[in-house]
Amino acid sequence: MNNDLKSSNSGASATSSNVSSESGLKRFGDKRISDILVESRRASVHRQRIQEFIIEKLLFAGGIAAIVFIALIFIFLFKEGIRAFFLIKPIEFIGTYILDFDDNRIFACMWQPVGESGKYSIIPLLIGSFLVALPATVISTVLGVGCGIYLAEIASIRIRDIVKPAIELLAGIPTVVIGFLCLTILATFIQNVLHTTFRLNAFVGAIGVSLVIIPVIASITDDALRAVPNELREASYGLGATKWETIWKAVVPAGISGVTASIILGMGRALGETMIVIMATGNAALVTGNIFSSVRTMTATIAAELGAVPQGGEQYCALFLVGAILFFITFALNLIAEIIISRMRKKLRL
Amino acid sequence: MKTEHGMQGQKKTKVKIEGLSFYYGKYKAINDVSMEFYECKVTAIIGPSGCGKSTLIKSINRISEITCDVQVEGRVLLDNKNVYDRDIDLVDLRRRVGMVFQRPNPFPKSIYDNVAFGPRLYGVNNKKRLDEIVEYSLAKSALWNEVKDRLNQSAIGLSGGQQQRLCIARALAVDPEVLLMDEPCSALDPTATARIEELIEDLKKYYTIAIVTHNMQQAARISDYTGFLLNGQLIEYSITTEIFTNPDKKVTEDYITGRFG
Amino acid sequence: MSIGKRKIFNTFFQGVCRGMAFLVIAALIGILVKVVANGAGVINPGFLWKAPTAGMTEGGIFPAIFGTVCITLLMIILAIPVGVSAAIYLTEYAGKNFFGRIIRASINNLAGVPSIVFGLFGVGFFVLFVGRGIDRIFGLPLLFGQPAMIWAAATLALLVLPVIIVSTEEALNSVPVSLREAAFALGATKWQVVRNVVLPQARSGILTGAILSISRGAGETAPILFTGCAYFLPRLPVYTIPYAHIPVINPLDQFMELSYHIFIMATQSTDAAATRPIQYGTTLVLIALTFLLNLSAIIFRIYFRKRSR
């Protein structure tokens, strides 16, 4: 075959001089490489086009799955939740009239599905959820933003390389473990220190929940502060500000939207937390403003009661309604946080 | 047979650009440019940064479309067929019009797999055939002797100049008719640059070559024809020796003598 | 304010931030120490390989470990095809158009759904709607329409879907555009570029995302509370094919699981004090498992980064 001769010739040096225009091109018998490629493609192009089409549709289906499932969640929650309105008088979701100990008729907000007439007031559950989530968010904001500032502005690179993964490790601990430790150790500790009436109460739950949210807030705050351009810091130092003044008065205000978004996201997570609250808050559906009282959150209610409920009954639908309300609240919070973040991104691009 | 310019052989048009205006979204990068690329000749395109040189040659193999929204007015003819026609097979177009990029971009695969990548796309799987194509392509881009013992090693381990020659080999493996080179030497040192320029001298016997360069000495050295682009417009296009010794327009002369750019 | 005062504030507040960070780290260390201290004593080969006995006060937790492995395996088998497809579609095909934006919004929303809501959905949709539906269509007795591993796995798969999609997208986007350009310039079709250039390079990122989502799935309890978990089920969720005597995982079976086990033991076991040591032991095993997974994800990431250099 004369191909080898020509190819090794032109490999010897860059300036090959002994080949004329056409014979320098590789040939397989009569055909050039391009002929071979075109032939080979012609044999398979039809099959290939079909294959590409199918693959693109499959990939599209995968993408659609996310839309489909979030829509399904919406539908199923609201479908069963709406039925609750048909099975239970809407006013009962706020409270019912009962006879109290002195046989007086009072309007009480109670969640007590089991019994001769089920009581489905959502009020104690809402109060329970917020009584845990709000203090948890406050604690986590203080500690989380503090950690975020430390990571972004104060820590040296070496320390940051240890502390940041450590905080993410905290985020990786399963919530059931944290709930377990709150139930066994933290509750006892707090009862010994603060002499609370209830050993398991909203405060214990709030601390447990904040352990889960602090990494969220710290991480996003860290990212938001690091995204603030250095020129800002240099300008501040140039005016003679101290490091803390630069952080607090220049950098944090510049990254405030990211910080705010992280707090809102954190609150959403706090409201949605289930295992810690079900293990640490005592699960008593009381209407109270006392943070040291046992409470029952929306999440704990669903988790505790869904297992023993006949499908389609009052309680079943009521639980779905609670789930729908919970979903709606967290959805709204996430939406607000997203809007803030996207506005922040747009600002940075300009 | 000599033409009136004293060059040997007939000049036949391989690629013809007619009244091309090229938009990235709303931004007009090329404004009504017309020029020809002759078969088996090297055509250089020079001009200051951002004048649209890369955009111009990328309009020939339609590679900008994969990353941006583009709009095109006018025609780009390859062998008298407009590449923007609706019935054009993009795969075949890009096989016939190969491209070498500014920064060498070999795949993170072995040297062999890089060169064999193209033929494999078209369904060629016969090992012996692939071996021959790989050897031929590497030989044609003056790389065979340097890598023939390490075809299975990663292409990333090669030097910059070697990587660029590998990219040329990769493009040659699908047997194109036109080679577009977008500032192929700008990321390389002078020695590697010289080797690639030698290579281009050899390659032009078989392929129509369009080379974008900001290095005017390079254009003067290796090209037969040169076009000068400024702000998306073709200011002047002529035989290389003419443009560099006796330019028609003052602005061309200013650019060539370094008054701006 | 005098300079001296400002300097004091400066040191003070920086110290406060430093203190907060270390407080958080201390909490982490405290948790780990406590679990290891109380749980290490229980860990021995018998604990890990035997089934529970005597009402959970003795014996081991092997079924829970096995169940956890099974459920996360099933979850990842369900989640990866959907997640990777979605990510490829978003980055390579239609990321910026109308559908792309809605898909992204849906993924963000999915990521924010509380885990118990996933549990509700798992019961209402997978078990009751899909499961009973299958039974009805095929005229079966109550086979699919009850809590089972497959439904729990599906619920978990939904939960980790955003994790996989986001990490796969990151991996795909980290492949430089220049490589894609080179492939297109040779005449490759879109899928050829994805399959031959992008995916091979993104493999490590996808693997990392998978490991992280396994870690997440193993730690979640709420979604599986009612979709398939059982407390005391010493029999393994395995089905032996008759005649061939080959054991396979039976996805229609219920299963024990580590986090669920901790939860029930701690809150509902008849003698909480007696089972306390086992609770700590199980907790230690669960934490060790999640840490191991997270660690290997990080190691893989570093290893693949070195290899592509």
Image: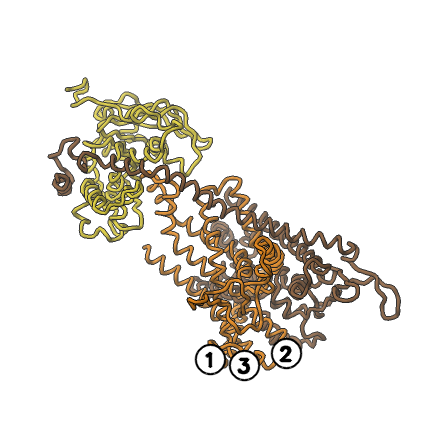
Chain colours: A brown, B yellow, C orange
Provide the chain ID for the residue under circle 1: C
| Residue that label 3 marks | C58
Which element carries disc 1, helix, strand or loop?
helix
Which element carries disc 3, helix, strand or loop?
strand
Contact between marks 1 and 2 (CB within 8 A): the answer is no
Name the residue located 85 percent from the left edge and 66 percent from the top edge.
A99
The amino acid beneath tag 2 is Thr
Q: Is residue B212 visible?
A: no
Q: Is residue C225 visible?
A: yes
Provide the chain ID for the residue under circle 2: C
Q: How many marks?
A: 3
Neighbour tally class for label 2: few under 14, some 14-19, many 20 plus, Cα within 10 Å: few
Tag 3 and tag 1 share a subunit:
yes
Horizontal relation, residue C22 to residue A51: left or right: right
Name the residue located 27 percent from the left edge and 20 percent from the top edge.
B248
The amino acid beneath tag 3 is Glu
Measured as percent of width and height from the top left, residue B16 is found at 31, 24
Q: Residue C144 lies in what quarter of the image?
A: bottom right
Earlier in the chain: of badge 1 and badge 2, it is 1
| Residue that label 1 marks | C46
Contact between marks 3 and 2 (CB within 8 A): the answer is no
Relative to C47, is C237 above or below? above
The alpha-carbon separation of the residues under discs 3 and 1 comes to 10 Å
The amino acid beneath tag 1 is Gly
